[in-house]
Image (cartoon, helix red, strand yellow):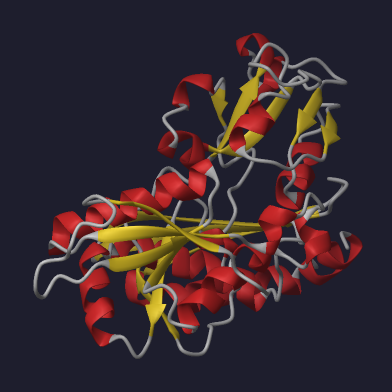
Amino acid sequence: MTATSTPATSTTGAGTPAEAGTAVLRLGTRASALAHTQSQGVADAITAATGHPVELVHITTEGDRSQAAIAQLGGTGVFVTALRDALLAGDIDLAVHSYKDLPTAPEPGLSLAAVPPREDPRDALVARDGLTLGELPPGSRIGTGAPRRVAQLRALGLGLEIVPIRGNVDTRLGRVAGMGHGPGDLDAVVLARAGLSRLGRLDVITETLDPLQVLPAPAQGALAVECRTSDARTRELLGRLEDSRTRACALAERSTLSTLEAGCSAPVAAYAEIAEGEDGPELFLRASVTALDGSDGVRGSRTGVLADAAALGRALAEELLDRGAVELMAASR
């Protein structure tokens, strides 16, 4: 995949010479407002923690160029491949991804150097007239591009019409009646609360959805910062951004996804929280697989210590597989 790169503004000013020992780090990012905001936040955190200036480099991905559904393009990896290619080629020193966009298989030559603190991973409803999900009348048109959300919204049995949508946050918000300059052809959209938070748009949310209704995507709200495995110095610098609790939660959730051998085209959800147990912090992991038409689904939960995050996810996935998850995912293809 070909990447198109253009330098963006450095956190210390484009073109500012780096001091000795603090060479500018080149951070690859997609050019969307959300990706740029996420990357700039990481760049600022790196500079604050290490003193190193960071320059953003825009990379165009296949997912950005196409308006086709993500599942048709081959999964969430379409937002990742060009960034990884640029990283492996040495065109950039690090890349910031929405963690949920990363394929579950590791990429040879690259390391997940840091998982910074996570934003609220729940989904959010943005509806006309300030309505909540339960207040929307039957037949209301709800926009979302995620099979996981489609399946879970249908499973609620509210009689909603689910409309597939793509585009950036502003484009999606513009499709809600009364929300800006878009067509206003929808009654509501469902988005990740984390993205709205990072863009300073929490004011548009009419309801943050309870995970009992709509369970989030694995690693939703978390960021993944990658660099070359061979670049020990950059790995050390990025490690200063690490939040071990966020990594443990994301690892448990993505281990569930990986064991199910599922990707973004499967309606799989997983959400881990940390609570104090009798012997210290414990992970409470929930996961679900739902038929795309909402007619059936399996849910389960497991509790364990943080050090066993990956094993916890695998065990829960195996339980869901024993209870029919394979058939549910197959019916959703």
| 286 relative to 66 in the view: left or right | left
Number of numbered discs overlaid on the protein picture: 0
- The percent position of residue 306, horizontal first and vertical second, equals 34, 70
Q: Which residue is rendered at x = 68% and y = 11% of the image?
A: 178
The quarter of the rendered structure image containing the C terminus is: bottom right
Task: Give the residue at the far left of this rendering.
Answer: 20
| 294 relative to 214 in the view: left or right | right
- Tell me: residue 203, above or below residue 275: above
| 109 relative to 276 in the view: left or right | right
| 313 relative to 138 in the view: left or right | left
Q: Which residue is rendered at x = 64% and y = 26% of the image?
A: 173
- The percent position of residue 293, horizontal first and vertical second, equals 88, 47
Q: In which quadrant of the rendered view does residue 144 lie?
A: top right
Say which of 120 and 103 sits in front: 103
Say which of 266 and 97 sits in front: 97
Q: In which quadrant of the rendered view does residue 257 lie?
A: bottom right
Evaluate whether residue 301 shows in this view: no
Q: Which residue is rendered at x = 72% and y = 51% of the image?
A: 148
- The percent position of residue 232, horizontal first and vertical second, equals 26, 86
Evaluate whether residue 102 shows in this view: yes
- Tell me: residue 287, above or below residue 262: above
- Tell me: residue 6, above or below residue 185: below
Q: Which residue is rendered at x = 41% and y = 49% of the image?
A: 38
- The percent position of residue 124, horizontal first and vertical second, equals 57, 33
